[in-house]
Every structure is written in C-alpha cells, then in structure tokens.
Image (cartoon, grey):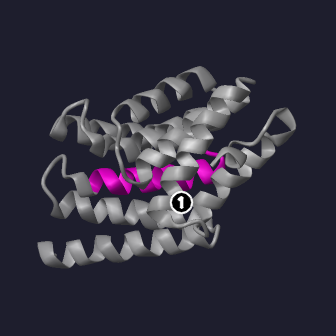
C-alpha cells in the first residue's frame, strides 16, 4: 500500500472512531482507533505527533469503556511520543496528560491523577485542552473535599471554556454543572462573575 493510501485510511478510521465515541459506542471506537494506529505507524515516521493523537483517542475510548489500565497504557504511549519529539515541558502534551489523568482517576488512583492534572495546568496551554486540565484539577479538588479550591478552578475553567467554546458547548455546560454541584457547599463561583 502507498503512504498516501495509508494516510487516508488512518484518517478515515480516526473519523469513524470519533463518530463512534460521540455515539457512545465505545468498543467500536476503540476498534476504529486501533485500525487508525495500525495504518499510521506504517505510513508515518517514528514518533509522529499524529500517531500520538491516535493513541490519546484510543485512551479516551478505553476509559469510556471502563478499561482504565488499557486507557493508561495508550495515554502513556501518546505521552512518550510527544515527550520524545518535543520535550517534557511542551504544551502539546496537555491533551495526552488529560487522557492519562482521566484514566488514573477512573481507576481510583486520585493522587497520581492529581499530579498529572497539575502538570498539565503548569504547561499553561491557553486553548480548550488547557481549560480541560483546569476543570480536571478542579474535579480532583472537589473529590478531595477542597471545595474552595474546586470552585476557583471550576470558575477559571468555565471562564476559559465559555470564551473559547461558547456557553452552549457541552464542555462548558459540564463545568457549569460542576459549579452548580458546589452550590450546596457555599456560594457559587458563577454568582461572582
């Protein structure tokens, strides 16, 4: 097979995985992402960032299925590719760090997840993945009962997501819902906008 054909194939498999993920067909998403990875590793250079994205996507599908160990392994592979290519302090690591932290949190390994989310926030990515890292760190603080810290982080994540994605985006709504869940534990951060 030609490189161009394999690149088109991995793109189609990745798209199929994303559609399956959106439809909550997690097993189908994982199968499609594995196919995309198989095509990408044949067509792309070693340690290509696009392959890292595919491993991250596979991690998200595995985590949604409750397969946290496989999700962690896929996120780690993604992270290794990006760290080798760009170094350990590059903002491009944030999406993979978010996936790794989610896998760890899903497995109940909250201390490790918090560390990973803190690392993602420290990279200070200004885009939607940075807002997700802040939201995730807020969720860890919320889980630990550190309500004031959770409120502060959720508020910042909401501000960024609303600005970047709009107030009607599902991610923004999720952060808004997290803030509302804190209302019984004190004044909502949204009330201070």
> At which x and y percent is residue 179?
71, 45
The quarter of the picture where residue 41 lies is bottom left
Q: Disc 1 marks which residue? A: 162
Q: Is residue 60 left or right of residue 145?
A: left
Q: Is residue 15 magenta?
A: no
User: Which residue sits at x=63%, y=27%?
Assistant: 149
> At which x and y percent is residue 13?
39, 72
Q: Is residue 52 magenta?
A: yes
User: What element does badge 1 sit on?
Assistant: helix
For the question of whether residue 70 can be seen, the reply is: no
Q: Is residue 172 left or right of residue 48?
A: right
- Image: magenta residue range: 51-68
> At which x and y percent is residue 155?
60, 43
Magenta-drawn stretch, dominant element (helix, strand or loop): helix
User: Which residue sits at x=47%, y=60%?
Assistant: 163
User: Which residue sits at x=28%, y=36%?
Assistant: 80
User: Which residue sits at x=29%, y=41%?
Assistant: 91
The answer to which of 120 and 84 lies nearer the viewer is: 120
Q: Residue furthest right?
A: 184
For the question of whether residue 189 can be seen, the reply is: yes
Quarter of the rendering occupied by the N terminus: bottom left
Q: Is residue 76 above or below residue 30?
A: above
């Amino acid at each position: 097979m030609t490189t161009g054909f394999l690149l088109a194939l991995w793109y189609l498999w990745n798209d199929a995985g994303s559609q399956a993920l959106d439809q909550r067909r997690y097993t189908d998403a994982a199968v499609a992402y594995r196919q995309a990875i198989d095509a990408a590793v044949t067509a792309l250079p070693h340690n290509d960032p696009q392959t890292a994205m595919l491993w991250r996507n596979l991690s998200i599908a595995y985590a949604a299925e409750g397969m946290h160990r496989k999700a962690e392994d896929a996120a780690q592979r993604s992270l290794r590719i990006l760290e080798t290519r760009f170094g350990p302090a590059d903002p491009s690591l944030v999406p993979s760090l978010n996936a790794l932290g989610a896998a760890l949190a899903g497995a109940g390994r909250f201390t490790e997840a918090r560390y990973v989310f803190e690392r993602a926030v420290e990279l200070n990515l200004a885009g939607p993945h940075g807002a997700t890292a802040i939201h995730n760190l807020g969720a860890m603080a919320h889980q630990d009962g550190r309500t004031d810290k959770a409120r502060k982080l959720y508020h910042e994540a909401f501000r960024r997501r609303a600005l970047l994605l709009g107030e009607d985006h599902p991610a923004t709504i999720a952060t808004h819902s997290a803030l509302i869940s804190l209302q019984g534990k004190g004044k909502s951060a949204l009330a201070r906008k």
